[in-house]
Image (cartoon, helix red, strand yellow):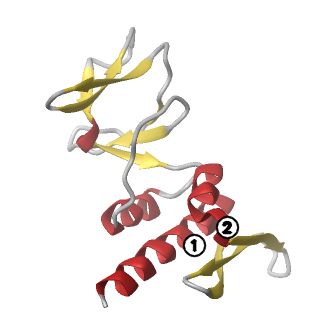
Amino acid sequence: MISIELARALRTAGLRWHPRSGDSFVIETSESTGDVFTVSEMTVEVHDFPSGQLIGFNGTTEWALDSVDVTDTLWLPREDQLREILRDGFRTLDVDRSGGEPLYLVTASVRGEVRTFEALTVADAYGEAVLDLIVQSLVTDGE
């Protein structure tokens, strides 16, 4: 799973979430416990209102929580979602085991330049590549 810090950096860089079934998220309020939730038609549903989206918790007994505004959540994209954002820019996924603990290497073409991004998890390696893609897009578009 992608790290909270990297998910925040992606959101800050401009990655937007349109909640769908199967998406994971955490609640970012002062009372949150850091629990990871998954959008599901049965227990955690997205409700669209003119004022915005709410995520409703149906039948949760361990939480005194009915709903939370999407703006109070942080999406934790899966590696397949991050790879989809990279689209044709994705080149390879490799693993380097030379240092003992595996290091995952995602190679991607970002604005025509082939780069390699490394992390301790596959999701974070993809996330680093997506973050660079967003940042480079902002820099290039802003010139």
Name which residue type carries label 2. Asp
Q: Is residue 39 left or right of residue 73?
A: right
Tell me: residue 29, above or below residue 59: below
Badge 1 element: helix
| Image x and y of residue 54, in percent | 26, 28
Give the distance between the C-alpha atoms of the residues marked 2 and 1, in whole angstroms. Answer: 13 Å
Coordinates of residue 48 in the picture (x, y in percent): 28, 25
**Could you tell whether 90 is left or right of 34 in the image?**
right
Q: Is residue 138 above or below residue 53?
A: below
Identified at 45% across, 16% down, the residue is 43
Total labels drawn: 2
Asked if residue 141 is positioned above or below residue 14 in the image, the reply reads below
Q: Is residue 48 left or right of residue 126?
A: left
Q: Which one is in front in this view, the residue at disc 2 or the one at disc 1?
A: 2
Q: Specify whether residue 120 is in view.
A: no
Lower position in the chain sequence, tag 2 or tag 1: 2
The residue carrying mark 1 is: 129
The residue beneath circle 2 is 88
| Residue 101 occupies quadrant | bottom right
Q: Nearer the viewer, residue 60 or 85?
A: 85
The residue sitting at 49% across, 39% down in the picture is 24
